[in-house]
Amino acid sequence: MTAGTERVRINGEPASTVSAFDRGFLYGDGLFETIRWVDGDVPLWARHRERLAEGCARLGLPVPDGSLEADIAEVAAGLPDAVIRLTLTRGVGKRGYALPDAVPGTRVVAATPSPTMRAGAYTEGLHLRLCQTRLAVQPALAGLKHLNRLEQVLARAEWNDASIDEGLMFDMEGRVVCATAANIFAVFDGELLTPALDRCGVAGVARAEVLALQTDVHVVALTLDTLLQADELFLSSSVRGILPVRSLPGRDWTPGPVTRQLQAHWLDLGLPPLKSPEFAA
Amino acid sequence: MTAGTERVRINGEPASTVSAFDRGFLYGDGLFETIRWVDGDVPLWARHRERLAEGCARLGLPVPDGSLEADIAEVAAGLPDAVIRLTLTRGVGKRGYALPDAVPGTRVVAATPSPTMRAGAYTEGLHLRLCQTRLAVQPALAGLKHLNRLEQVLARAEWNDASIDEGLMFDMEGRVVCATAANIFAVFDGELLTPALDRCGVAGVARAEVLALQTDVHVVALTLDTLLQADELFLSSSVRGILPVRSLPGRDWTPGPVTRQLQAHWLDLGLPPLKSPEFAA
């Protein structure tokens, strides 16, 4: 990505670089959000704001004021479908891990055109592999979308086969947690199960939307054996929406009614499926 | 820190900012070294190079060529005593965790004058507290000095009392691992014990030097109860050198002969104690 400054604002000004002494760069000391913008709106914005506020509280960062929304509107202006990456860091401080004294944080807001998804991703579903890289158990950081993402980088580096769409990740004790960049739900007799994220994993805003919608939803410890017996499996992502799982090693599915119903809800929210490359602008 | 470009080189050129799309900033996807420079030399350079090579191999980053040493000499030129921060990242790629196709990485080399240590730090020792923040068990990243350092940031944020010099950190299962920015050794009847770092923690270059010097040294699982019975405790740090531990909650020590002998070795290496603020230039 070699975006110029026209679609990036840093601390409210057009810019495309950050200090080499920013604690985001030195230590990953910050948070981010990936946000879908469609036709001048961010349908899940209230949930992004809520997660951001919780992350700021847990890491001791100031919560951004209303100029954040203005920055988003500015960088995404004119784009019909875009992904906004918002990055908040503790800013530039003196050397070492100790928190700097009341320095302003750094806020990067950048827009890029939305990615495409291969044809069939929404209608037939995704092929998932099982990742070898495990997620470490760290309750102090669990659920946050913080900038320490080497585990996801290592997991995603395990495959380079375009026929594999995503990888399922497990914690150190073998419990299912998430995909590398999405949350996962299993459907059993119309009831939804999704992994608890109080030990590791990112609590996605799309996951929060599904949890708020459904009455029969249970946040539990989940094993692969349980997943393989589900009636339906799907992934949730703020950018990609609701994606049926078509296969895991050892089992195939066809998209089921609960997945379809949630995809319809996403459309109602104003979040249509991402285009396939043939139809992208 | 508001260094200008005169003591920072990025990819071999004077500069002080990095792309807001650098994977170091986006995901903490990289490594760093903190290196002490004294009078035109880096006494532990071979060990820094060795750790860097191992880190690059494990994260799949290219190992820097000899222009790295030239960059260090350039940024530190004229400084009698300096800390070099070297940061290597996977560079700027397309959006998402997937590894970019053969993009050049980013290399930041920055020099700052060495920090001071309070009077008595080397002669009487440091006061340590016990950190509540635990280190997650993650063998895939253990030992590496990577850019995902939120655990250390949270641990260091636990205290703001100038009479506390460092914090002792434990893993999720309660084993002793390290201080927030140093390794730890315990002495029993002339034998050294230090925590194994195959599950979490950073394998410091000063620790490697101690391990190479001593014949009676054992890399083991260590508990706090064991530490509290030690004849001597000391910390090792590439920047700060060999630091006696004066107290942990529940026990005081006076610096012992093994600690003194290692401090003398550090002096022989060309790494004198950091100055106290009264005597800093």
Image (cartoon, coloured by chain):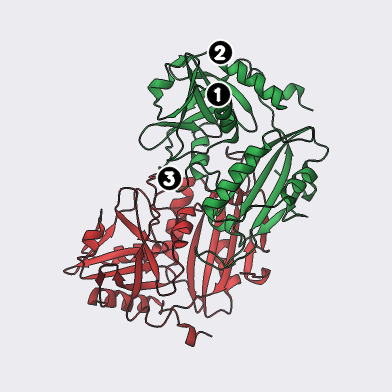
Chain colours: A red, B green
Q: Which mark is residue B214?
A: 1
Q: Chain of mark 3?
A: B
Compared to residue B227, the image places residue B56 above or below, namely: below
Q: Which residue is mark 2?
A: B256
Q: Which residue is at 46% across, 60% downward?
A: A49
Compared to residue A144, the image places residue B92 above or below, namely: below
Direction from residue A268 to residue A274 in the image, left or right: right
Task: Name the kind of residue labelled 2 in the image.
Answer: Gly
Please report whichever mark, 1 or 3, sits nearer to the chain's N-terminal start.
3
Instruction: Label 3, secondary structure: give it.
Output: loop
Front residue of B112 and B229? B229
- Residues marked 1 and 3, same chain: yes
Q: Which residue is mark 3?
A: B139
Compared to residue B162, the image places residue A39 above or below, namely: below
Q: Which mark is residue A115?
A: none
Front residue of B233 and B251? B233
